[in-house]
Amino acid sequence: MTVRAQRTANDYGVLVEPLTGEVTAWRNNVVLARSTRARVMYETRLPPVVYFPKDDIRADLKPAPDYRTFCPLKGTASYSDVQVSGETIENGAWHYPTALPEGQAVDGFHAFMPGVASRIEYDGKQLDTPFGGNISGPIVDWLLREAWTARTAEELISALGKKLVEDGVAVCRMTVLIWSLHPMIAGQNSIWQRDTDEVTSRYPSYELLESPIFKNSPLQHVADGLGGVRQKLDTNPDEFNFPIMDDLREQGVTDYVAMPLPFSDGRINVLTLASDHPNGFTTANLGLIFECSALISRLFEVFALTSNATTILETYLGKRTGARVLGGEIRRGDGEVIDASILFCDLRHSTRLETELGRDAYLSELNRFFEVTTEIVNEHEGEVLKFIGDAVLAIFPAGGDRDKACRQAVASADQIVQRLAVPEEDGNGIPLTCAIGIAFGEVTYGNVGSKERLDFTVIGSAANIAARLGDHGKVVGHPIVASKDVADEADCGATPLGAVELHNVADPVEAFAVSVCPAETAS
């Protein structure tokens, strides 16, 4: 493969020079450091920084291992608390224990954070003014003018990769790891390859995050707030002992960077870049990417916010209802009047189960009850609207087909009863029983509540009747009790229970005990 020559993407640079004469750093009237060997680092668009040899620092430095920062040019900075005149300044000084090439001139030197030294005196040459003007160039123009048009995170990472290559940055592989707020999926890891111009997205589970492969990876290192990773595979191969480095080296990678992409909520996501150029990334190109990383992070945060909002709404409200809320039905009174079958499923003997099993085991069985019920309702095109204590409220919209909505509700009830009756092999070894009531009717499907706190639910007599029919089933000893129009759709028949007086229901309801189909013929 022919590797394109790298061009200078901007004027970014790092320059370290010795300072002549004696240099003294003061904090008020106390000397922090005094040296004739001090050095100054000039970095584009940053104030000059004076570094002192550790032996010439008079203040006490106490390592602060829980705080680090990262620069892909100089390396990962470790910090120390500065103790002087009875005062402790947290993370007041830093140094680079394993400096990268651009920072090796200050290896073994320490610098003070802004404000720690009240003044610095120079006997010799004074500091020059910072060099470098505004950030500019095709990549910056693209980020400001065009990047926002990407419709997905995958489209954005592909466009960014191609733009970097077009502007002369020898990046052959780029990944972005974005954490999610999904109950089962930890995040999205998208990988772009220059040679194929393809993006592959993976969705690691929380269990995968506990695997040795992930724990011993640059992604975990950065996400844990330990700073970034810069490994020129021919310069500092021993700094980070990550197994992926061997794989990348075999693929022709010469330079690797993993840098944090912090979001506004404090979560640390990860951007990685790999180069196959013989000399790796140039200082100018890598400096430009690092300067733009905050803007890149915000672009990806837009997609993450949309994805997380969808996930949270679907998790707490259900897919259909979540989509309606995300689509703008957010005001009190928003909704519609629909015909639907309403299923109310109540776990039996909850109090006894909690007493006999203990809290943790009971919660495990309660979650199994919710999971089984939700899975079956979803399979039959229904939607769980809410969990109410140890009960489930589900809806099967008719959409013009009353008979289908009733059949779906009855089939769901039948399978729920049968599935719960079989203990989990790796669970507590007990069957669960439930009481299910089903009714059909016109309901209001939408937002109700106070001005500040809304609930997307169903309101109508059918919902109340379904709950009361379930209660009646407990009394007469039948797991599934339905109104007549629903019971007519039962595959295995229904037994009349007569006109039943239900609590808070004005007129008697013709109730039927729905027979549970034999397991081998259950639909």
Image: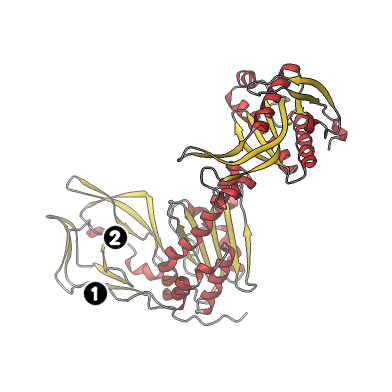
Please give the residue where the numbered disc 2 appears in the rendered image.
Answer: 110
N-terminal of the two: label 1 or label 2? 2
Residue at horizontal 75 percent and vertical 17 percent from the top = 476
Q: Is residue 123 above or below residue 447?
A: below
Foreground pick, 137 / 44: 137
The answer to whether one can see residue 141 in this image is yes
Identity of the amino acid at label 1?
Answer: Thr
Could you tell me residue 144's position as x and y percent? Answer: 45, 71
Residue 394 percent coordinates (x, y): 67, 36
Closest to the camera, between mark 1 and mark 2, is 1
Element at label 1: loop
How many C-alpha atoms fall within 10 Å of the one at disc 1: few (<14), some, or many (≥20)?
A: few
Look at label 2 and name its amino acid.
His
User: Mark 1 — residue?
Assistant: 129
On-image quarter of the C terminus:
top right
Pick whichever, 298 or 454, lies toward us.
Answer: 454
- Which sits in the foreground, 414 or 349? 414
Q: Is residue 514 left or right of residue 367?
A: right
